[in-house]
Structures are given as C-alpha cells and as structure tokens.
Image (cartoon, helix red, strand yellow):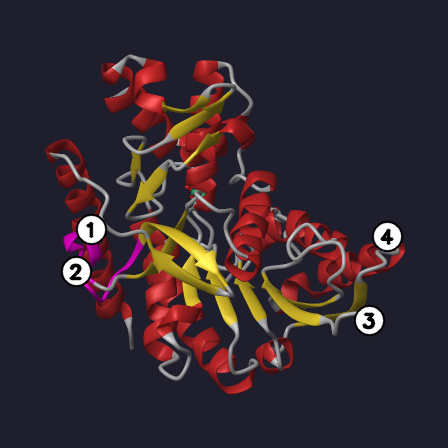
Amino acid sequence: MAKDPIRILVTGAAGNSFSLITLISYFLLIGQIGYALVPMIARGVMLGPDQPVILHMLDIEPAMEALNGVKMELIDAAFPLLKGVVATTDAVEACKDVDIAIMVGGFPRKEGMERKDVMSKNVSIYKAQASALEKHAAPNCKVLVVANPANTNALILKEFAPSIPEKNISCLTRLDHNRALGQISERLNVDVSYVKNVIIWGNHSSTQYPDVNHATVITGSGEKSVKELVADDQWLKTEFITTVQQRGAAIIKARKLSSALSAASAACDHIRDWVLGTPKGTWVSMGVYSDGSYGIPSGLIYSFPVTCEKGEWSIVKGLKIDEFSREKMDATANELIEEKSLAHSCVN
Ligand code: LMR
C-alpha cells in the first residue's frame, strides 16, 4: 500500500543570490542550498524511493517570484514522489502540519564575516519562526537548522518553541562529518563509503573539533583504525583538523557563495538517518541539545556522535577522551556559551 505523504518545510527555498536582495537587511536566503535541496527531497534522496512528499517552501517577499519559478521547475521535473508544493511568504501557511522542517533561511554570512556578525538578524528570524512552528507544525515535527550560526539558531528556536520536544530540534554538522570522511578518504585513497565513525564535536564553526580517534576504515581483512592507517598523528592533529574547520570558508572564498550542493546533500543524510536509522555499528554527528554527556554543559546545542533508531537519536556514550580532545571539546563548548549569551543579549 502506498505510504501517506510527509510534509516537509524548507525555508529560504528560492535559494538565489540576488545582488539587489543582498542589499536588503532582512533577508532570508542563504546561497543556493534551498534550490539544491528541494529536488533532492522530491526525488526521494531524503526519505527513500517509496515515500511520497509534499514540499512547503517559505521565503521572503522579494523572493516570491523566484520561489514561484522554483515551484514551476518542481512541477516540470514531474517527480513521481512529489504530491504537492506550497510556495509562500506566509510563515503560518508554510508551517501548517509539517512533519519535518529544514531551516535553511537565515541572514547569510559573506566572505570575511564571522557568525557573530549575523547573530542579531538571525535571532529575530528564528524567534518568529519558532512560534509559527510551535503553533502550526505537526506535533512530532522534527526540525533541522542549517542556517548559521546553526547551533545557536537552533537553541533560540528551542527556547522560543518550548512545546516542541528538545529531542526534535537539531542543527546540521553532518556537512562537517562528511567533510571529515572525505578528507580521510582522499588521504588514504580509499572509497569514502568505507570510512566511518569520525566525530564532529561542538559548534558548526571554525572551533569545531573533527575527531578521528575512534574512526575506522572497512578493509578486506576487517575494520582498521584510521589513526593506524594514516600513521601521521601530526597531520591528524593539525592540517586535517584545520582543513575541516575551514572548509566552509574555503568554499565561500572559491565560489563567492556558501557551500550548497554538499550542504543540501548533508541535510538529506541527517534527516534520512534520523528518520530511518543509522546502519548498525555506525554513528553520525548531529547538533543536539546537550544532556551533559562528556562534560558538555546542558543548555547548549552541541554536535555529538549519535546513533538513530525508530526516529530517535541517542548520544554514543563511553568513548575514551584524551587530553588533546578534551581541550578542543571544551574550546568549542566555550564558543557556544559565548554565542548563547550574545544571542540572549540580542533578544528583544
Ligand atoms: C559551510 O560550512 O559551508 C557553511 O556553514 C558556510 C559557512 O558560513 O561557513
């Protein structure tokens, strides 16, 4: 029997970068992630080839014509799984009954800007969207925040939508997780699908800590430790970490736009694993509300290694943390504490 369609909200869905609109201060678009993401969802990349979907796309008024253009393209693509498209600038209509909300819209970071620069603009956007989601989304709606500063935007959303369970609010660090897998795969010249269990700890920012201490590569003779195969601790503790930490900035520098296809693909991976489960023996990284695990203060949205089953994530417990890791995990937590207090100071 055919499954009922799942309603998925994508904010910032028009996804263009108009020079005119970039002049407007209240501005939801972020690069082209939304434009890359909606066809992936409609094709079944996110929820599987037998799951029909209805797309809800929200953007700001100046982007409405472009948003209608995206709707026209979605119709023209004749995706068999796509059972409806709502394209709107009205947050209430956009949030109505959605089962999954992917928050791509936010004030975008430009070359040379730090996340902190965009904080106050995003606090007001996320506060407003929290209340629309809380009132109008389906009761068990899962929320993924992609727009930067993603962890803190997600925290603001959580604080202003108290009736949404904290388990249902997350932010994207799967992009960083996938970047770490990619760097190891390149270094070892092995297929990326054989590399697993890297960890991104902390903030989706340049203080994140990409950790390979527990990562392995599947080989013909069983799983081998990434550390042993790379056999270069110096590289793992320096260049590998900074490459992953700085990858977003490197892409902005090269493209003059934020990453889009990799971010959209990571958002699909994040939701797919959350809803359908992580493969046995594999964990992924998700920004989730800290329960105090690994000494990370609760009250932060922090990226942890998680496994997912039956639509619920759980933090992987009991991993051994060495001194080097401890320092890096605390540094990124401290940045999140600062971001949180900056965000609170912007709330009006
Ligand atoms: C990325 O990681 O590619 C994005 O978050 C861009 C950014 O602002 O760093």
Q: Earlier in the sequence, mark 4 or mark 1?
A: 4
- Answer with the quarter of the image where residue 237 lies: top left
Q: What secondary structure is found at the residue carrying circle 4?
A: loop
Q: Is residue 110 visible?
A: no
- Local crowd size for mark 3, using a 10 Å CA cut-off: few (<14), some (14–19), many (≥20): few
Note whether 156 is above or below 203 in the view shown.
below
Q: Earlier in the sequence, mark 2 or mark 4?
A: 4
Q: Earlier in the sequence, mark 3 or mark 1?
A: 3
> What label sits on residue 297 in the rendered view?
2
> Label 4 to label 3, Cα distance in Å?
25 Å
> Label 2 to label 4, Cα distance in Å?
46 Å
Residue that label 4 marks: 77
Mark 3–mark 1 CB contact (< 8 Å): no
- Pick the front one: 27 or 100: 100
Residue 83 location (% of width, % of height):
81, 68
Please state, as top left, top right, bottom left or bottom right, where the C terminus lies in the image.
Answer: bottom left
**What residue is drawn where x is 86% and y is 52%?**
77
Mark 4–mark 1 CB contact (< 8 Å): no
Mark 1–mark 2 CB contact (< 8 Å): yes
Give amino acid for label 3. Met
Q: What secondary structure is found at the residue carrying circle 3?
A: loop
Q: Earlier in the sequence, mark 4 or mark 3?
A: 3
Q: Is residue 86 found inside the magenta-colored segment of the image? A: no
Note whether 31 is above or below 65 in the view shown.
above
> Label 2 to label 3, Cα distance in Å?
46 Å
- Pick the front one: 333 or 5: 5
Residue that label 1 marks: 333
Residue 139 location (% of width, % of height):
52, 83
- Pick the front one: 335 or 330: 330
> Label 1 to label 2, Cα distance in Å?
8 Å
Part of the protein shown in magenta: 292-302
